[in-house]
Amino acid sequence: MPANVVITGSNRGIGLALVSHFLKNEKVKHVFACCRNPAEAEQLNALAASYGTAPRLHLIQMDVTDSASIAKSAQEVSAVVGSEGVNLLINNAGVNEAHTKDGPQSFFGATHEVYLKIFNVNTIGPVIVTKEFLPLLESASNKWPHSGQLSIDRAAIVNISSGLGSIANNNTGSSLFPNVAYRCSKTALNQFTKTAAVDLADRNILVVSCCPGWVRTDMGGPSAPIDASQSARLLCTNFARLDASSNGGFFKLNGERDEY
Protein backbone atom coordinates (compact mmCIF):
# COMPACT_ATOMS: atom_id res chain seq x y z
CA MET A 1 0.00 0.00 0.00
CA PRO A 2 1.42 3.42 -0.95
CA ALA A 3 2.33 5.63 2.00
CA ASN A 4 1.77 9.01 0.34
CA VAL A 5 -0.90 9.51 -2.31
CA VAL A 6 -1.73 12.57 -4.45
CA ILE A 7 -5.07 12.69 -6.30
CA THR A 8 -6.17 15.48 -8.64
CA GLY A 9 -9.80 16.37 -9.25
CA SER A 10 -10.70 15.23 -5.73
CA ASN A 11 -13.68 17.43 -4.93
CA ARG A 12 -16.30 15.06 -6.33
CA GLY A 13 -17.03 11.89 -8.27
CA ILE A 14 -14.30 9.33 -8.78
CA GLY A 15 -11.60 11.54 -7.27
CA LEU A 16 -13.51 11.99 -4.02
CA ALA A 17 -14.29 8.27 -3.90
CA LEU A 18 -10.60 7.42 -4.36
CA VAL A 19 -9.68 9.77 -1.52
CA SER A 20 -12.21 8.07 0.76
CA HIS A 21 -11.04 4.61 -0.26
CA PHE A 22 -7.37 5.26 0.48
CA LEU A 23 -8.17 6.84 3.84
CA LYS A 24 -9.86 3.62 4.96
CA ASN A 25 -6.47 1.87 4.89
CA GLU A 26 -4.35 2.92 7.88
CA LYS A 27 -1.17 1.97 6.01
CA VAL A 28 -1.70 5.08 3.89
CA LYS A 29 0.07 7.83 5.77
CA HIS A 30 -1.00 10.91 3.80
CA VAL A 31 -3.64 11.54 1.15
CA PHE A 32 -3.38 14.85 -0.72
CA ALA A 33 -6.70 15.77 -2.28
CA CYS A 34 -6.17 18.39 -4.97
CA CYS A 35 -8.88 20.53 -6.51
CA ARG A 36 -9.42 24.07 -7.80
CA ASN A 37 -11.46 25.40 -4.86
CA PRO A 38 -10.95 23.38 -1.65
CA ALA A 39 -12.92 25.91 0.42
CA GLU A 40 -16.03 25.23 -1.67
CA ALA A 41 -15.63 21.44 -1.76
CA GLU A 42 -18.29 20.60 0.82
CA GLN A 43 -18.02 16.82 0.71
CA LEU A 44 -14.24 16.92 0.79
CA ASN A 45 -14.23 19.29 3.77
CA ALA A 46 -16.71 17.08 5.61
CA LEU A 47 -14.46 14.10 5.00
CA ALA A 48 -11.45 16.04 6.26
CA ALA A 49 -13.32 17.14 9.40
CA SER A 50 -14.15 13.53 10.23
CA TYR A 51 -10.43 12.79 10.65
CA GLY A 52 -9.91 15.29 13.48
CA THR A 53 -7.12 17.71 14.27
CA ALA A 54 -4.20 15.52 13.11
CA PRO A 55 -5.44 14.71 9.62
CA ARG A 56 -4.08 12.19 7.18
CA LEU A 57 -6.09 14.04 4.57
CA HIS A 58 -4.65 17.28 3.21
CA LEU A 59 -6.70 19.58 0.98
CA ILE A 60 -4.49 21.18 -1.66
CA GLN A 61 -5.48 23.95 -4.05
CA MET A 62 -4.55 23.02 -7.61
CA ASP A 63 -5.80 24.20 -10.98
CA VAL A 64 -4.41 21.75 -13.54
CA THR A 65 -4.61 24.43 -16.24
CA ASP A 66 -2.32 26.78 -14.26
CA SER A 67 1.38 25.90 -14.12
CA ALA A 68 2.03 28.19 -11.15
CA SER A 69 -0.80 26.58 -9.20
CA ILE A 70 0.58 23.10 -9.93
CA ALA A 71 4.09 24.09 -8.87
CA LYS A 72 2.78 25.59 -5.63
CA SER A 73 0.80 22.45 -4.84
CA ALA A 74 3.92 20.30 -5.32
CA GLN A 75 5.77 22.54 -2.86
CA GLU A 76 2.96 22.18 -0.30
CA VAL A 77 3.04 18.41 -0.61
CA SER A 78 6.83 18.37 -0.37
CA ALA A 79 6.65 20.35 2.90
CA VAL A 80 4.64 17.50 4.42
CA VAL A 81 6.31 14.39 2.99
CA GLY A 82 9.91 15.62 2.90
CA SER A 83 12.42 13.02 1.76
CA GLU A 84 9.77 10.27 1.83
CA GLY A 85 8.38 11.62 -1.42
CA VAL A 86 5.15 10.63 -3.15
CA ASN A 87 4.45 6.97 -3.86
CA LEU A 88 1.34 7.34 -5.99
CA LEU A 89 0.18 10.19 -8.20
CA ILE A 90 -3.30 9.78 -9.67
CA ASN A 91 -4.05 12.19 -12.51
CA ASN A 92 -7.82 12.09 -12.22
CA ALA A 93 -8.95 15.65 -13.00
CA GLY A 94 -10.91 15.74 -16.23
CA VAL A 95 -13.64 17.58 -18.11
CA ASN A 96 -16.15 16.83 -20.81
CA GLU A 97 -18.74 18.94 -22.58
CA ALA A 98 -22.29 18.21 -23.63
CA HIS A 99 -22.05 16.21 -26.83
CA THR A 100 -24.48 16.44 -29.72
CA LYS A 101 -24.08 15.68 -33.39
CA ASP A 102 -23.30 19.28 -34.29
CA GLY A 103 -21.97 20.38 -30.90
CA PRO A 104 -18.67 22.21 -30.30
CA GLN A 105 -16.74 19.04 -29.43
CA SER A 106 -18.17 16.99 -32.28
CA PHE A 107 -16.51 16.43 -35.64
CA PHE A 108 -19.10 18.50 -37.50
CA GLY A 109 -19.45 21.42 -35.11
CA ALA A 110 -15.93 21.58 -33.68
CA THR A 111 -14.69 24.82 -32.13
CA HIS A 112 -11.17 25.75 -31.10
CA GLU A 113 -12.35 27.01 -27.72
CA VAL A 114 -13.95 23.76 -26.56
CA TYR A 115 -11.25 21.49 -28.00
CA LEU A 116 -8.52 23.54 -26.31
CA LYS A 117 -10.40 23.55 -22.99
CA ILE A 118 -10.78 19.76 -22.97
CA PHE A 119 -7.21 19.08 -24.06
CA ASN A 120 -5.86 21.58 -21.54
CA VAL A 121 -7.43 19.72 -18.62
CA ASN A 122 -7.44 16.10 -19.81
CA THR A 123 -4.05 15.91 -21.54
CA ILE A 124 -1.79 18.87 -20.85
CA GLY A 125 -2.77 19.02 -17.18
CA PRO A 126 -1.47 15.52 -16.39
CA VAL A 127 1.77 16.23 -18.24
CA ILE A 128 2.52 19.36 -16.20
CA VAL A 129 1.36 17.80 -12.92
CA THR A 130 3.62 14.81 -13.51
CA LYS A 131 6.55 17.07 -14.33
CA GLU A 132 6.17 19.05 -11.11
CA PHE A 133 5.70 15.97 -8.91
CA LEU A 134 8.45 13.93 -10.56
CA PRO A 135 11.14 14.86 -7.97
CA LEU A 136 8.84 13.62 -5.20
CA LEU A 137 8.16 10.38 -7.07
CA GLU A 138 11.89 9.92 -7.59
CA SER A 139 12.54 10.43 -3.87
CA ALA A 140 10.06 7.68 -3.04
CA SER A 141 11.45 5.35 -5.70
CA ASN A 142 15.03 5.80 -4.55
CA LYS A 143 14.19 4.52 -1.08
CA TRP A 144 13.62 1.03 -2.45
CA PRO A 145 16.70 -1.21 -2.50
CA HIS A 146 15.94 -3.22 -5.64
CA SER A 147 16.06 -1.88 -9.19
CA GLY A 148 13.39 -3.01 -11.63
CA GLN A 149 10.69 -3.63 -9.04
CA LEU A 150 7.71 -1.48 -9.96
CA SER A 151 4.54 -1.00 -7.92
CA ILE A 152 2.21 1.64 -6.53
CA ASP A 153 3.88 1.08 -3.16
CA ARG A 154 7.19 2.27 -4.56
CA ALA A 155 6.44 5.06 -7.04
CA ALA A 156 3.71 5.18 -9.67
CA ILE A 157 1.71 7.47 -11.91
CA VAL A 158 -1.83 6.42 -12.75
CA ASN A 159 -3.60 8.42 -15.46
CA ILE A 160 -7.37 8.06 -15.35
CA SER A 161 -8.28 7.56 -18.99
CA SER A 162 -11.36 6.18 -20.75
CA GLY A 163 -12.28 3.32 -23.03
CA LEU A 164 -13.29 6.03 -25.48
CA GLY A 165 -9.59 6.82 -25.84
CA SER A 166 -8.85 3.49 -27.50
CA ILE A 167 -8.22 3.76 -31.23
CA ALA A 168 -8.33 0.00 -31.77
CA ASN A 169 -11.76 -0.31 -30.13
CA ASN A 170 -13.36 2.68 -31.83
CA ASN A 171 -15.98 1.03 -34.02
CA THR A 172 -18.76 3.56 -33.48
CA GLY A 173 -17.16 6.86 -34.49
CA SER A 174 -19.52 9.66 -33.44
CA SER A 175 -22.72 7.65 -33.80
CA LEU A 176 -23.15 6.95 -30.07
CA PHE A 177 -20.98 9.59 -28.46
CA PRO A 178 -20.26 12.62 -30.68
CA ASN A 179 -17.58 13.77 -28.24
CA VAL A 180 -14.56 13.75 -30.52
CA ALA A 181 -12.62 16.24 -28.39
CA TYR A 182 -12.97 14.07 -25.28
CA ARG A 183 -12.04 10.92 -27.20
CA CYS A 184 -8.95 12.55 -28.68
CA SER A 185 -7.87 14.03 -25.33
CA LYS A 186 -7.90 10.58 -23.73
CA THR A 187 -6.09 9.03 -26.68
CA ALA A 188 -3.40 11.68 -26.28
CA LEU A 189 -3.29 10.97 -22.54
CA ASN A 190 -2.64 7.31 -23.31
CA GLN A 191 0.23 8.31 -25.58
CA PHE A 192 1.70 10.33 -22.71
CA THR A 193 1.34 7.29 -20.45
CA LYS A 194 3.26 5.06 -22.83
CA THR A 195 5.96 7.66 -23.46
CA ALA A 196 6.43 8.43 -19.77
CA ALA A 197 6.60 4.72 -18.96
CA VAL A 198 9.54 4.35 -21.34
CA ASP A 199 11.21 7.56 -20.21
CA LEU A 200 10.92 6.81 -16.49
CA ALA A 201 11.65 3.08 -16.53
CA ASP A 202 15.28 3.60 -15.47
CA ARG A 203 14.01 5.60 -12.48
CA ASN A 204 11.81 2.66 -11.42
CA ILE A 205 8.60 4.66 -11.68
CA LEU A 206 5.54 2.78 -12.91
CA VAL A 207 3.21 4.58 -15.35
CA VAL A 208 -0.17 3.26 -16.51
CA SER A 209 -3.54 4.41 -17.82
CA CYS A 210 -6.71 3.03 -16.25
CA CYS A 211 -10.34 3.26 -17.31
CA PRO A 212 -12.72 3.86 -14.38
CA GLY A 213 -15.70 2.44 -16.26
CA TRP A 214 -18.94 4.23 -17.00
CA VAL A 215 -19.72 5.85 -13.66
CA ARG A 216 -22.72 7.74 -12.27
CA THR A 217 -21.09 11.13 -11.83
CA ASP A 218 -21.76 14.63 -13.15
CA MET A 219 -19.74 13.61 -16.21
CA GLY A 220 -21.01 10.05 -16.61
CA GLY A 221 -24.67 10.89 -16.09
CA PRO A 222 -27.48 9.08 -14.25
CA SER A 223 -27.68 6.12 -16.65
CA ALA A 224 -24.21 4.78 -15.86
CA PRO A 225 -24.23 1.26 -14.36
CA ILE A 226 -21.92 1.82 -11.36
CA ASP A 227 -21.39 4.52 -8.76
CA ALA A 228 -18.14 6.29 -7.87
CA SER A 229 -17.49 4.15 -4.79
CA GLN A 230 -17.72 0.95 -6.81
CA SER A 231 -15.38 2.36 -9.44
CA ALA A 232 -12.85 3.47 -6.83
CA ARG A 233 -12.88 0.08 -5.12
CA LEU A 234 -12.29 -1.79 -8.38
CA LEU A 235 -9.63 0.68 -9.52
CA CYS A 236 -7.70 0.26 -6.27
CA THR A 237 -7.93 -3.52 -6.54
CA ASN A 238 -6.36 -3.21 -9.99
CA PHE A 239 -3.71 -0.75 -8.76
CA ALA A 240 -2.51 -3.29 -6.21
CA ARG A 241 -1.84 -5.85 -8.96
CA LEU A 242 0.33 -3.56 -11.08
CA ASP A 243 3.99 -4.52 -11.51
CA ALA A 244 6.83 -4.18 -14.02
CA SER A 245 4.87 -6.17 -16.61
CA SER A 246 2.10 -3.56 -16.41
CA ASN A 247 4.30 -0.58 -17.20
CA GLY A 248 2.97 1.55 -20.05
CA GLY A 249 -0.28 -0.39 -20.17
CA PHE A 250 -3.88 0.72 -20.55
CA PHE A 251 -6.26 -1.22 -18.27
CA LYS A 252 -10.00 -1.80 -18.18
CA LEU A 253 -11.95 -1.65 -14.94
CA ASN A 254 -12.01 -5.46 -14.81
CA GLY A 255 -8.21 -5.46 -14.69
CA GLU A 256 -7.68 -6.70 -18.24
CA ARG A 257 -5.15 -4.92 -20.44
CA ASP A 258 -6.90 -2.87 -23.10
CA GLU A 259 -5.76 -1.95 -26.61
CA TYR A 260 -4.51 1.50 -27.39
Image (spheres, rainbow, N blue to C red):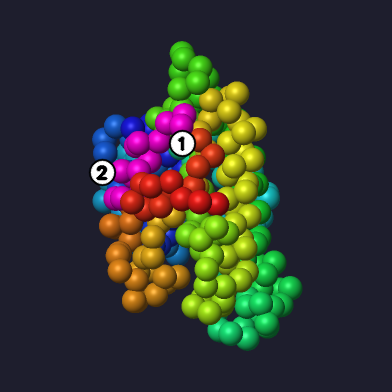
**Residue mark closest to the camera, 2 vs 1:** 1
Residue 172 percent location from the top left of the image? 52, 72
In this view, the residue farthest toward the top is 145
Q: Is residue 135 above or below residue 32?
A: above
Q: Amino acid at mark 1?
A: Ser
Main SS of the magenta part reads: helix
User: Residue 243 sits in which quadrant?
Assistant: top left
| Residue type beneath disc 2 | Lys
- Image location (x, y in percent) of residue 241: 35, 36
Element type where label 1 sits in the image: helix
Residue 251 can be seen in this image: yes
* Quadrant of the rendering where the N terminus is positioned: top left
Q: Which residue is mark 1?
A: 246
Q: Which residues are magenta?
A: 233-246
Question: Which type of secondary structure does the marked residue at label 2 adopt?
Answer: loop
> Looking at the image, which residue sits at the far right?
112
Mark 2 or mark 1: whose residue is earlier in sequence? 2
Q: Is residue 11 magenta?
A: no
Whole-percent x, y for residue 217 in the image: 38, 68
Res 143 seen here: no
Q: Which residue is mark 2?
A: 24
Q: Quadrant of residue 27?
A: top left
The residue at the point 62 percent across, 33 percent down is: 198
The structure residue drawn at horizontal position 61% and vertical position 61%, both measured from the top left corner, is 185
> In the drawing, does residue 237 fall left or right of residue 159?
left
